[in-house]
Image (tube, coloured by chain):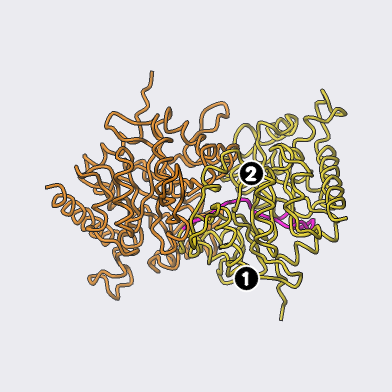
Chain colours: A orange, B yellow
Amino acid sequence: MYHIKNFADRLLDAVDQKSSSVVVGLDPDVRKLPEFLIERSQARHGHGLKSLAAAVLDFNTQIMEAIHDIVIAVKPQIAFYEALGIPGLRTLQKTIRVAKSHGLLVIQDAKRGDIGSTAEAYATAHIGFINQGKKRSIFGADAMTVNPLLGTDSIEPFLKRTETQGKGIFVLVKTSNPSSSEIQNLEVITDSERHYLYEVIARLVCRWGKNSIGKRGYSSVGAVVGATFPQEARLIRDLMPQTIFLVPGYGAQGATAQDIVHCFNSDGKGAIVNSSRDIIYAFQKDERMANQSNPDFALAARDSALKMRSEINNALRKAVS
Amino acid sequence: MYHIKNFADRLLDAVDQKSSSVVVGLDPDVRKLPEFLIERSQARHGHGLKSLAAAVLDFNTQIMEAIHDIVIAVKPQIAFYEALGIPGLRTLQKTIRVAKSHGLLVIQDAKRGDIGSTAEAYATAHIGFINQGKKRSIFGADAMTVNPLLGTDSIEPFLKRTETQGKGIFVLVKTSNPSSSEIQNLEVITDSERHYLYEVIARLVCRWGKNSIGKRGYSSVGAVVGATFPQEARLIRDLMPQTIFLVPGYGAQGATAQDIVHCFNSDGKGAIVNSSRDIIYAFQKDERMANQSNPDFALAARDSALKMRSEINNALRKAVS
């Protein structure tokens, strides 16, 4: 029988193999892509969505070729592909195939959350299969982000995939954006005690993940915990020692390596850190490429990812020792 | 200058013109479609996603032809189209075009919620335009559902479209699913008072909607309030008199016309009610069509929608008088 490996184990093995906790967010905003890529694509495909989507695929492909050995996963933000319509969503599918050909894990950043029958359809689309004579995946990601607001029955269709199909989810617990505290930091009464809402959600996430804990002691049901709120991150870390944190907010959103140390367990394990804009658009700030019409954006991305990897590894080394 | 009409006004005008508060959810689960439609499509397109997506388009088109004069809007649940991949998403786009050709409003049920830059991309995709020489819409819906968990900055890109571009959103306040209370009914302390989380969200939604109130006194920032929790609905209704409720849960999810009366203001205005499965799959329970190989599913859908319209209108008439 074919053995399906637990997602958390796959992820942690990749972290060890690459000495890296870095995830690169593929959030291709066409206004920020190198102009020469767009122009080249327009020369071939004309003006329109197809042309933009082809430029994005070219951009993603070159970036992944440059960084695949130093990062563990890519995290495409589906909104940026939806905004380019059908050609954009095709580019997302192709991007995922390229990522897999490089051995990169793929975390679909979709933040879906809906009633049971709908959640089942989302799980099928992003991390599942449809059965039409033979099994076929639609997007074929390894994991996806989900929103917990609708509660347990909205999460169950995803749990099935974490428990038996080697897939993963990351549930929003404390997001990285400025307004994140408005709802997530509300004080809630449960069992006559006061807690922050994100603590209550953290406890739910632990419960949801208890049947998908792998050989390495972590669950395939992870948590999104923003690097921009280090104090909250420390509190949440203590609540959920067996949960892998997917940590957004590094770089462009303002968090540093010092900030993200609190997202890891005391042994330096248990978190992966995403940066999107600071890596994929690194060419814009790269002095070597100032005023160049064909900036080597993939090289700039690689250098930025290397820098991020060592910043995090150094901060963790200090914290653990 | 071309005048863009406020979404809430457009919606309430449609309610008056059609004497109807009925929204039909187009949630096409291919396992529930009439078999003859799938077979006919397979004979033409072979076995695969394209064939299923074509059957769904046929199904949706016939249903909309049959119901467009008695319902005000359709609400496609995007998950069911995503689950059919690129062909499915093409079918969604075509479904929206057919809906508009019949004068139906389109509420994209997407429940998106993400950080500002991503929310901007989602708003562009679903209710906005991209500017490529000329303005083009991607999905071109009139309104969409959104998830409030990330707070104000995650909603702002949508508000812009409600205030100046004639679009609408419906923010999840109290959902219709069984686990809805797990998080949404937590007791929260704000200003030294205890409230349910859904009340806090309701107040935020009122604030978000204050700049998009139309001539008829309602905001284009609406709320999703499940019919399955009538007690909560009554409480929420009092908190937000100028908010239009999009009420799911009628029919298959268990709510009756009596239950949904509390979602309306005392003058019988201010809510629209969705039913998906009970209308689009009505042929399965229609005695006239038992054992038929070509059931007239569109007629069954029309009869079910007519029944729902009069049930609601009768219940409202009693409640108002």
Q: Which residues are magenta?
A: B97-114
Q: Position of residue A294 (x, y in %)?
A: 32, 68
Residue A114 is at least partly visible in this image: yes
Give the quadrant of residue B203: bottom right
Q: Nearer the viewer, residue A6 or A93?
A: A6
Residue A52 is at least partly visible in this image: no
* Residue A66 drawn in magenta: no
Quick one: which residue is furthest to the top in this view? Answer: A1
Q: CA distance from mark 1 to mark 2?
A: 25 Å
User: On residue B201, which mark appears?
Assistant: none
Callout 1 amino acid: Lys
Q: Position of residue B185 (x, y in %)?
A: 55, 47
Q: Secondary structure at mark 2?
A: loop
Q: Residues at badges 1 and 2 in contact (C-beta under 8 Å)?
A: no
Label 1 is found on which chain of the structure? B
Which callout, 1 or 2, points at the residue further toward the start of the chain? 2
Q: Position of residue A35 (x, y in %)?
A: 40, 69
On the image, numbered disc 1 is attached to which residue?
Answer: B210
Question: In the figure, A35 relative to B147: above or below?
Answer: below
On the image, numbered disc 2 is attached to which residue?
Answer: B176
Q: Secondary structure at mark 1?
A: helix
Q: Nearer the viewer, residue B183 or B52?
A: B183
Marker count (numbered) = 2
